[in-house]
Image (cartoon, rainbow, N blue to C red):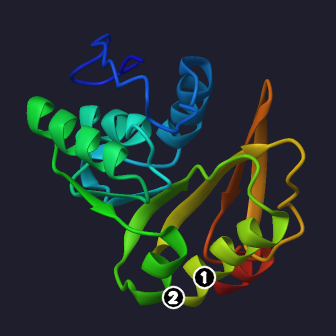
Amino acid sequence: MRIISGKFKGRRIAPPKNLPVRPTTDMSKEALFNVLNNHFNFSELKVLELFAGTGSISYEFGSRGCSPILCVDGDIGCINFIKKTAKEFEFDITAIKSDVFKFLEKHSGNYDIIFADPPYGMAQKEFEKMVELIFEKELLDEEGMLIVEHSKYTKLDKMPNYSFQKNYGGSVFTFFVPTLRDESEDENQE
């Protein structure tokens, strides 16, 4: 695994082989961040990564200057690895061991970007519940974005707040925003 851009571009990170993860591929990460580059100034972002695994996505945000970053995962091995790596790179990353759904039900906060990479085998209704909880709890800034990584078999494009999706091999990134503004309303207000 490597960091693909920012201050630590090209640096390799070697997670333990026994972690229960499926890291986002370099190709998919590069494509994701190409999309995000068009929407955000990274140095001003607060980021939440759910089902963080190795923390690969958080390191990309950290390398681009995002701060603070909060990672949540249910595996203590993943959390310990994220803490160790964050310290090594001096990233402003906090890692919390928690069931993601319990975390979402209790957490209050406001983030510019929430990235979630649940196990691809997670049930469709669980994916939907996660997205619904994020919007019910108003965890996203009004200009923020939720990105969910999933397999092509999970369909999230009919959910409220859906914006668009991008397919990369066997992975799909679905993007959600708090409200889709009606452009005609904007024109009428000018």
Residue at the spot 77% in from the left edge and 47% down from the top edge: 165
Residue at the spot 43% in from the left edge and 77% down from the top edge: 103
The amino acid marked with disc number 2 is: Lys
Q: Is residue 139 visible?
A: no
Residue at the spot 40% in from the left edge and 19% down from the top edge: 4
* In the displayed structure image, the side of residue 19 where residue 131 appears, left or right: right
Disc sitting over residue 137 in the figure: 2
Residue at the spot 76% in from the left edge and 49% down from the top edge: 121
Residue 181 position, x and y percent, is 70, 76
Disc sitting over residue 133 in the figure: 1
Q: Are marks 2 and 1 in contact (CB under 8 Å)?
A: yes
The amino acid marked with disc number 1 is: Leu
* In the displayed structure image, the side of residue 105 where residue 133 appears, left or right: right
Circle 1 sits in a helix, a strand or a loop, which is it? helix
Disc sitting over residue 31 in the figure: none
Q: Nearer the viewer, residue 161 or 77?
A: 77
Q: Nearer the viewer, residue 89 or 96?
A: 96
In the image, residue 42 sits, relative to residue 106, either above or below, namely above
Asked which quadrant contains residue 7, the reply is top left
Instruction: State the quadrant of the N terminus.
Output: top left
Instruction: State the quadrant of the C terminus.
Output: bottom right
